[in-house]
Image (cartoon, helix red, strand yellow):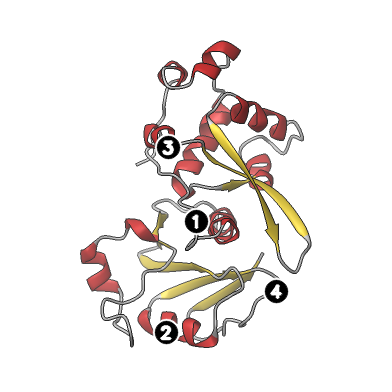
Amino acid sequence: MRKNVRTTTIKKYLKGMEEANIRLTQRDKAFLKDLAQVRLVGAKDAQQYHYGGKDSSQRRLQKLVEVGLLNERTVVQPGKGKVEKCYEFASDRIAKLHGGRGAGIGSKRSDLHELLVSQTYFKLGRPEGFKLGDQMTELEKKAFLQPVRGDSSGITPDAYYEQGGELIFVEADAGQYTKKQVMNKQMSWTGIKQVWVQPAKANCVVPRVGDVEVMRL
């Protein structure tokens, strides 16, 4: 659950904020709510959706990095030669204050992968009830996922939400998926509408079959 957290509460955890005498604006709070939702937000989406398209947005986000509220990452998008700044909570403790978690980027989850999931959330219009895959309950897994070879419990999508009473799965491929991996996931999600996202350069092009939409970001 996303939370509205008072500046005074955050200052108890962040000495740098107290020393810099910074108060969170309504734009900051809107950004932090979405950050709690998707755990990583790109600078371009922050500028467009939270800071009114102003170029000063990156200066503001950098200030929140300096006081210890955020951490900044630099993500390279293969095939585009683009580099984008992204932001996450500086710690799990700060993330929990806002009802979120840390981005969890590591050997199994790349920053590009997490950025693609986040970008899809914004492209879809920031749907209400959007959840990341690790929030799926065991009951939901049993109800929604079909067993596939090598995974009797089914394969969990990167994110999911409901729209107009219809369940939609979101899956991000950072460009490394094989044809077999794509097929196994689609088999596990038989009968469910799917939104896939890939970078411009990908090892396997996801087939647009049935209720499958593919985005290139």
Foreground residue among 68 and 120: 68
Image quadrant occupied by the N terminus:
top left
Residue denoted by label 3: 95
- Separation of marks 3 and 4 at Cα, in angstroms: 32 Å
Please provide percent x and percent y for residue 69: 53, 29
CA gap, disc 3 and disc 1: 17 Å
Q: Mark 2 or 4 closer to N-term? A: 2
- Mark whose residue sits in front, 4 or 1: 1
Identify which amino acid the numbered label 2 is placed on: Asn
Vertical placement of residue 11 versus 177, above or below = above
Q: CA distance from mark 2 to mark 4?
A: 21 Å
Whether residue 119 sits left or right of residue 5 in the image: it is right
Mark sitting earlier along the chain (3/2): 3
The mark that comes first in sequence, 3 or 1, is: 3
Point 33% across, 88% down: residue: 149
* Residue type marked 3: Ala
Q: Which residue is mark 1?
A: 106
Instruction: State whether residue 64 appears in this view.
Output: yes
2 left or right, relative to 77: left
Q: Earlier in the sequence, mark 4 or mark 1?
A: 1
Say above or below: 175 vs 118.
below
What residue does disc 2 label?
184
Above or below, 16 relative to 122: above
- Residue type at the position of mark 4: Lys
| Observer-nearest of 105 and 197 | 105
Number of numbered discs: 4
For residue 201, the mark is 4
Secondary structure category for the residue under label 1: loop
For marks 3 and 4, the one nearer the N-term is 3
Q: Quadrant of the C terminus?
A: bottom right
